[in-house]
Image: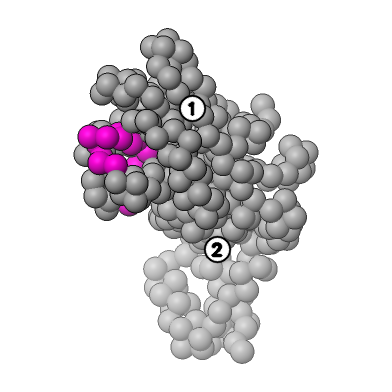
């Protein structure tokens, strides 16, 4: 295997010059740069990325920990984060925690060993102290775990209010809200708070159904919604805290012989691509997923460069009305 010394010898330059070309430091003439790159290609030279990162004190790698790569919201978020990071010259290490505290801790230790330049947390099962001791830039998504760690969230309260008000304005008399487990203390719980506030103000009969602690386990959704229709056959409106849950509600309506939107009106949350694949197409509260991904990378970069940044970053949502309401 060729070494940096072999490249320097064949290109007739110093090892220092090859290093400067690799790390893009200092002035190097275009002729010399071209000669070094041609020699590396000729010798099939592969730079030692770990050694280079130690020299630069920068790995150009960012870690992303999410609960489930299979969940469409997080897969779309990861896609946007990776694309934007790549445009800036960074690679991404994707970690799938599955809400397992031990797995999340193992991934954090792995990211620390690989000297990543920053960590974006979309999964939060560990205690706050685990994050405070990372000694590297960190950003959390949809959870505020410390006043010292910046976080990003959509305006969950506004989203919950928009959904609830639309169902009421459409004439729904008994509305169900299906949400994640409220004991998890996620910022998404504000959707439920807003829903309850609107129901109380408008004096509309309502019911709130929570998932179990593994809020992203899709196997439970079908059972939850089936039982919901058994217990409340007169239900005429559903606000689901995700488009995936809303999709299961559409399926259960078909099984129960209920027409959408004539008998039951359904609103989801996120506006993932699949919201437009359903029949009828799903009314939903749109989270700015691309903007969340971009902001996460920007916050990591600002911390790396010791620039000023906001700790609280709440982005606006938008109600997208389609055929399910």
Occupied quadrant, residue 269 = top left
Decide which of 87, 194 is in the foreground and name it.
194
Nearer the N terminus, badge 2 or badge 1? 2
The label on residue 207 is 1
Which tag is nearer the camera, tag 2 or tag 1?
Answer: 1
Task: Write the residue at 60% across / 58% down.
Answer: 95
Q: Position of residue 33 (x, y in %)?
A: 44, 71
Local SS, label 2? helix
Span colored in magenta: 258-274
Decide which of 86, 104 is in the foreground and name it.
104
Vertical comparison of 4 with 254: above or below: below
Occupied quadrant, residue 189 = top right
Local SS, label 1? strand
Can the viewer see residue 121 in this picture? no
Q: Is residue 52 left or right of residue 197?
A: right
Q: Is residue 216 magenta?
A: no
Q: Which residue is mark 2?
A: 23
Task: Write the residue at 38% across / 48% down.
Answer: 252
């Amino acid at each position: 295997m060729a070494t940096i010394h072999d490249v320097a010898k064949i290109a007739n330059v110093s090892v220092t010059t090859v290093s400067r070309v690799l790390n893009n430091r200092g002035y190097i003439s275009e002729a010399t740069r071209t000669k070094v790159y041609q020699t590396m290609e000729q010798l099939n030279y592969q730079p030692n990325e770990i050694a280079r990162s130690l020299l630069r004190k920068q790995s150009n790698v960012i870690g992303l920990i999410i609960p489930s790569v299979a969940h469409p919201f997080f897969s779309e978020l990861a896609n946007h984060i990776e694309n934007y990071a790549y445009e800036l010259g960074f690679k991404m290490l994707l970690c799938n925690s599955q809400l397992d505290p031990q797995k999340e801790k193992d991934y954090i230790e792995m990211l620390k060993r690989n000297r990543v330049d920053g960590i974006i947390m979309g999964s939060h099962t560990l205690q706050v102290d685990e994050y405070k001791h990372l000694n590297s830039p960190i950003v959390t998504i949809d959870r505020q775990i410390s006043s010292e760690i910046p976080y990003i969230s959509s305006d969950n309260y506004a989203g919950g209010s928009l959904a609830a008000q639309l169902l009421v304005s459409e004439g729904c008399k008994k509305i169900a809200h299906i949400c994640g487990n409220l004991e998890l203390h996620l910022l998404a719980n504000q959707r439920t708070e807003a829903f309850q506030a609107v129901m109380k103000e408008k004096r509309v009969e309502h019911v709130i159904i929570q998932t179990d602690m593994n809020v992203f386990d899709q196997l439970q959704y079908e059972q939850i919604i089936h039982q919901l229709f058994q217990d409340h056959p007169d239900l005429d409106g559903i606000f689901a805290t995700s488009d995936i849950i809303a999709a299961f509600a559409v399926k259960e309506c078909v099984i129960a012989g209920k027409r959408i939107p004539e008998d039951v009106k359904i609103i989801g949350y996120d506006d993932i691509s699949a919201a437009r694949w359903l029949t009828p197409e799903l009314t939903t509260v749109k989270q700015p997923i691309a903007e969340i991904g971009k902001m996460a990378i920007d916050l990591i970069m600002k911390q790396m460069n010791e620039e000023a940044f906001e700790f609280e970053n709440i982005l606006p949502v938008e109600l997208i009305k389609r055929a399910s309401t």
